[in-house]
Image (spheres, rainbow, N blue to C red):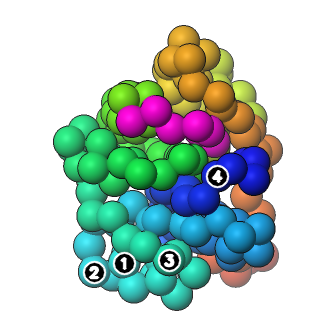
Amino acid sequence: MTAEIDTVLAVGAHGRFAGLVPPALRGKGIKVRALVRDDAAAAAALRNGAAELARGDLRNPGTLVAAVRGVQGVFHIGPAFAPDEAEMGLNMVRAARQEGVAKFVYSSVIQPTYAKLPNHASKIVVEQALFESGLDYTILRPTNVFQNLVAAWPAIVKT
């Protein structure tokens, strides 16, 4: 994200991974508007450092256009294992394009072309839309999110 970016819409700013976005951007003088669906997510996003909230649903394109309006950047991470994750990502890309967002950062997976894993295959659809969108984009391909192992660690140790 560059200096001319004042505000970024962050999908998942209430969660463990994207919840790291608000403090990181705040440290660079960039405000985060968190996309949230409910009061619990709103409270968590504010605790994580979001400066603004936008109520919306990745399945409802109209709410996304309103959420994106006035921001210069979008950080998008889709909900893990949602059967319609690709469509939700496409909705966000379309909203960002419609509103002329300057930068789109997409958190994908290490192997989006591996079709045997539907949650991976859904990412390539969104990546392709970004390639064709005309938006300035960055695609992140994290290999593993180790924080997800914390909850599973006791069961791993038992086996």
Distance Cα–Cα, label 1 vs label 2: 5 Å
Helix, strand or loop at label 1? It is: helix
At 58% across and 68% down in the image, what residue appears?
31
CB contact under 8 Å: marks 2 and 4:
no
Query: Mark 2 packing: few (<14 Cα in 10 Å), some, or many (20+)?
Result: few
At mark 3, the secondary structure is loop
Residue 13 percent across, percent down from the top left = 52, 67
Circle nearer the N terminus (4, 1): 4
The amino acid beneath tag 1 is Ala
Task: Classify residue 146 by image quadrant.
Answer: bottom right
Which numbered disc, 3 or 2, marks the residue that appears first in the sequence?
A: 2
Task: Give x and y (percent) for residue 77.
Answer: 54, 48
Depth check: give the residue in front, 55 or 15. Answer: 55
* Callout 3 crowding tier (Cα within 10 Å): few <14, some 14–19, many ≥20: some
Seen from the viewer's position, the closer of residues 47 and 134 is: 134
Name the residue tied to disc 3: 51
**What's the magenta region?**
99-106
Residue type, mark 4 in image: Ile
Q: Is residue 52 left or right of residue 135?
A: left
Question: Mark 4: which secondary structure?
Answer: loop
Task: Name the N-terminal-most of marks 4 and 3.
Answer: 4
Q: Name the image quarter holding the C terminus.
A: bottom right
On the image, numbered disc 4 is attached to which residue?
Answer: 5
Q: Which residue is mark 2?
A: 39
Residue drawn at x 33%, y 81% as measured from the top left: 40
The residue labelled by disc 1 is 42
Q: Magenta span has 55?
A: no
Q: What amino acid is at disc 2?
A: Asp
On the image, which quarter does residue 26 sit in?
A: bottom right
Measured Cα–Cα span from mark 1 to mark 3: 11 Å
- How far across and down, in percent of the image, does residue 107 sit? 63, 43
